[in-house]
Image: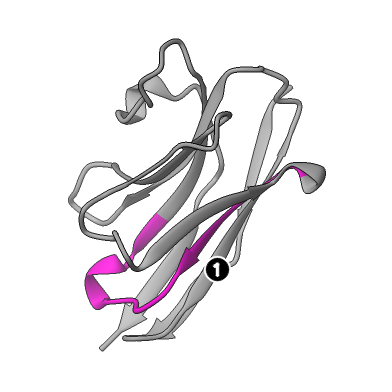
Amino acid sequence: QVQLVESGGGSVQSGGSQRLSCTTSGYTYKNYCMGWFRQSPGKGREVVALLDDRGITSYADSVKGRFTISRDNAKNALYLQMDSLKPEDTAAYYCAASVRYSYLLPTRSNEYNYWGQGTQVTVSS
């Protein structure tokens, strides 16, 4: 049984930093892609950052240069370091995992089979 569990959300002031963690269990696919998505009220779930088994990363334009995705294979953990946070980064953040079927990273939320429960990040101005 695959489980993804996020932690690290909370409230932070604009310009501050926060790190999200996602611990995984039961996920044994060789070719995979993991990522962070976010969703704010009234909006669809959008991709934030992706990282695949080859170490290839992809970021949404809105977070490039501010957010960094990384993993620790020994701990079965995925991280999202968020710096220079803005009020528009306020959202529920979700960790997700997918099998990678091609050299391209899956970027749509409906391509991901496994999801965490989400963690709220609130950035105040």
For mark 1, does the 10 Å Cα neighbourhood hold few (<14), some (14 to 19), or many (20 or more) residues? some
Q: Which residue is mark 1?
A: 19
Position of 112 with respect to 9 (left or right) is left
Callout 1 secondary element: strand
Q: Which residues are magenta?
A: 76-92
In the figure, 54 relative to 5: above or below?
above
Residue under the image location 55 percent in, 68 percent down: 19
Residue under the image location 66 percent in, 17 percent down: 29
**Amino acid carrying mark 1 in the image:** Arg
Q: Quadrant of the C terminus?
A: bottom left
Position of 20 with respect to 68 (left or right) is right
Is residue 77 magenta-colored?
yes
Residue under the image location 36 percent in, 25 percent down: 106
Q: Residue furthest top?
A: 101
Of the pair 98 and 1, the residue shown nearer to us = 98
Image x and y of residue 92, in percent: 40, 57
Quarter residue 103 falls in:
top left
Image x and y of residue 124, in percent: 31, 85
Rendering colour mode: one colour
In the figure, 38 relative to 1: above or below?
below
Residue under the image location 55 percent in, 30 percent down: 54
Position of 54 with respect to 56 (left or right) is right
Image x and y of residue 88, in percent: 22, 69
Of the pair 103 and 78, the residue shown nearer to us = 103
